[in-house]
Image (tube, grey):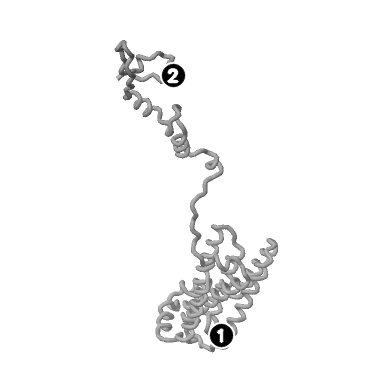
Amino acid sequence: MPFVLVALVLAWAIMLLFGGMEFDRGLLLYFYAGDHPVLADVARIVTEFGGFGFLLPATAFGLAFLLVRRDWRAALLLPAITLSGRILVLLQKDWAGRLRPEDQQHLVAAQSYAFPSGHAANATLVWLCLALLLARGPRARPLAIWAAVWLALAVGLSRIMLGVHWPSDVIAGWAFGLFWALLLLRLSGHPLAEGTLAPAPSFSPRRRSKMDKSRPDDSALIDEAERGPGQSGVSGGNLQREIAARAEEEHEIGDAGDEGDSVTRVHGSDKPRDGDRPNLPNR
C-alpha cells in the first residue's frame, strides 16, 4: 500500500510539471471528438457521470444505504472522503492555475482552471468509494470495483474528447482521486485499505478431517503387526519363516546304549500328533 500511494503522488507531480507540452497536445488532438458528432454526443453523456448532478445523488443514496445497514464507520467515511476530496481538487486548481485548451475546442461549457480534472478526480473518488464500502462478498466487490474503475476512466477520457482538459489534467485527476480514497481508508484503519490492491491469498494444505483422524492408518497397522510378537513367540511374528527354518533342522540324538540303536533324524511325520513341538513337513 505505501508503494502504491508514493507512485500515485509521483504520477500527479509528473503531470503537473510536464503538462501542456507537445505530448499533451498530441494526445488531445488524437482523442478530440470535434470532427465526430456521434462520439461527441457519447462523450457528453458519459461526462455527466463525473458531474455534480450525478455524484451528489449517488453519494446520498450510498450514505442512506449504509445507515440502513448500520455500518456506521463506512457511513462516516463515504461523505468524509468524497467531500474533502472535492474541496482539495478546487484548491489544487486555484494553486496550479493552469489554463484549459483553447476555447474554440470546447464542446461543452467549462469553467475554473484545468489542473487537475475535477470530473476525473471526483468520479474516481465517489464511484470507487461506493464500490468499496457498499459491495460485499467475494464476487460482488471485485465486480463493483472494476465497474467503478472503468466508469472513472470513461469519464476522464470524455473530458479529453470534449476538448476541455489536457490529458495530463485527467491523469492527475485519476491519480489524486485514487490516492485520497486509499489514504483515508488506510488512516481510518478500515480493512479494505489493505485488501484492495493486495495479492490473492495463497491456499494452505488441506487439513485432515476428524473422520480421517479417527480412522486407523493401514501403514500404521502393518508396522504394529511387524513389531508385535508372532504366534510362536519369536520376535518379528513371521511364522512362515520359522516353520521353514525348522523344516530344515536335523536333530541328532545320542547312542541308545549297548543296544547300538540310534535315531539320527526326526521329521514331522515321525512324531505323534500330540507332541510338544509343531509338526514339520516332509522334505
Q: For the point 49% across and 61% down, which residue is it?
A: 200
Q: Is mark 1 on a helix, strand or loop?
A: helix
Q: What element carries label 2?
A: loop
Task: State the image quarter where residue 88 is shown.
Answer: bottom right
Residue 81, placed above or below residue 166 = above
Q: Which amino acid does label 2 sit on?
A: Asp
Q: What is the spatial separation of the Cα atoms under label 2 and label 1, in whole angstroms?
A: 110 Å
Q: What residue does disc 2 label?
A: 276
Q: Which of 91 and 160 is in front in this view?
A: 91
- Please provide percent x and percent y for residue 258: 31, 12
Q: What residue does disc 1 label?
A: 93
Horizontal relation, residue 78 to residue 7: left or right: right
Task: State the image quarter where residue 79 is shown.
Answer: bottom right
Other residues around mark 2 within 10 Å, as few (<14) / some (14–19) / many (≥20): few
The quarter of the rendered structure image containing the C terminus is top left
* Viewer-side label of 2, 1: 2
Q: Residue furthest front?
A: 258
Q: For the point 51% across and 68% down, which residue is it?
A: 149
- Please provide percent x and percent y for residue 206: 50, 50
Q: Which of 8 and 41 is in front in this view?
A: 8
Q: Which amino acid does label 1 sit on?
A: Lys
Q: For the point 50% across and 54% down, which residue is it?
A: 204
Other residues around mark 1 within 10 Å, as few (<14) / some (14–19) / many (≥20): some
- Please provide percent x and percent y for residue 26: 40, 82
Horizontal relation, residue 245 to residue 37: left or right: left
Q: Are marks 2 and 1 in contact (CB under 8 Å)?
A: no
- Please provide percent x and percent y for residue 244: 34, 26
Q: Which residue lies furthest to the top in this view?
A: 259
Residue 53 visible within the image:
no
Q: Which of marks 2 and 1 is nearer the N terminus?
A: 1
Q: Nearer the viewer, residue 14 or 113?
A: 14
Task: State the image quarter where residue 136 is shown.
Answer: bottom right
